[in-house]
Image (cartoon, rainbow, N blue to C red):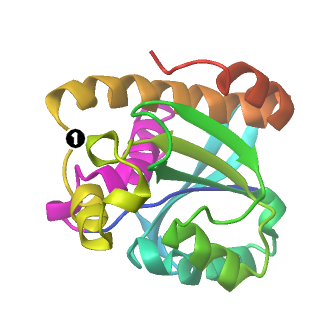
């Protein structure tokens, strides 16, 4: 079973935040593939279904982004699988809004949710689907304080950004299907070279 996790924060006040793009992607995939994500396991909402002929577990952790690793380590243990069958969808400040970037493995890139997963599972070797949210005012990390960045990622997309994000959700779902059916190399070649619109 492939475990597909979208990172986000639970609760209605966070629903449309930039940091919740992982949750939104899981919601989109769940609706598109008719997979209810309602069963509570390991502090997460989960749902089992099939995508591209592969059995998958869709997951929305309720541990808040920065503690995502707790829920994911529990699920890997429960289903007797390892990080090689894990795919994580998350926001990325260093990509233009709506841009996808697929990769296997690597460091956290400063994303605390990914850092938590690496720490709790003891492995960097899992698939990532990164969805760009840009930085505030296209600034570098050196010109914005940590509080500014937190306020930004916990803010909602503008109407212009939202159009890009709607396209990104479609592309991310397609990319995940491609990963499952054709493998990561094929998906990277197809989706890392283009914008989502």
Residue span colored magenta: 11-35
- Is 131 on the left-hand or right-hand side of 49? left
Nearer to us in this view, 4 or 111: 111
Q: Is residue 43 visible?
A: no
Quarter of image, res 77: bottom right
Query: 164 or 1: nearer the eye?
Result: 164
Give 159 or 140, whichever is nearer the viewer. 140
Main secondary structure type of the part rendered in magenta: helix
Q: Is 27 part of what is drawn in magenta?
A: yes
Residue ID at (38%, 42%): 133
Coordinates of residue 45 in the picture (x, y in percent): 43, 66
Residue 160 in percent (x, y) is at: 20, 25
Q: Report x, y in % for residue 87.
A: 67, 53
Look at the picture and state if 82 lies above or below 155.
below
Q: Which residue is mark 1?
A: 157
Residue 176 visible (yes or no):
yes
Q: Position of residue 80 (x, y in %)?
A: 81, 75
Q: Is residue 94 left or right of residue 165?
A: right
Residue 36 placement, left or right of 138: right
Q: Quadrant of residue 84?
A: bottom right
> Quarter of the image containing the N terminus?
bottom right
- Crowding at dot 1, Cα within 10 Å, few <14 / some 14-19 / many 20+, comes out as some
Q: Secondary structure at mark 1?
A: loop
Residue at 41%, 79% (x, y): give it: 63
Q: How many marks?
A: 1
Task: Identify which residue is drawn at 31% across, 50% down.
Answer: 18
16 drawn magenta: yes
State the quadrant of the C terminus. top left
């Amino acid at each position: 079973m492939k475990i597909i996790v979208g990172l986000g924060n639970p609760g209605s006040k966070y629903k449309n935040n930039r940091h919740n793009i992982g949750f939104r992607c899981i919601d989109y995939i769940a609706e598109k593939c008719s997979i209810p994500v309602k069963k509570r396991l390991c502090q997460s909402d989960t749902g089992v279904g099939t995508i591209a002929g592969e059995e998958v577990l869709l997951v929305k952790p309720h541990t808040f982004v920065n503690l995502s690793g707790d829920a994911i380590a529990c699920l890997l243990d429960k289903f007797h699988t390892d990080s090689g069958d894990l795919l994580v969808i998350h926001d990325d400040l260093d990509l233009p809004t709506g841009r996808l970037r697929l990769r296997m493995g690597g460091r956290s890139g400063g994303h605390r949710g990914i850092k938590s997963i690496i720490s709790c599972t003891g492995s960097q070797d899992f698939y990532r689907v990164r969805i760009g949210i840009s930085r505030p005012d296209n600034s570098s990390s050196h010109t914005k304080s940590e509080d500014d960045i937190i306020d930004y990622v916990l803010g909602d997309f503008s109407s212009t950004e939202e159009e890009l994000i709607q396209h990104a959700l479609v592309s991310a779902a397609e990319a995940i299907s491609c990963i499952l059916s054709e493998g990561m190399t094929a998906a990277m070649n197809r989706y890392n070279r283009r914008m989502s619109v």
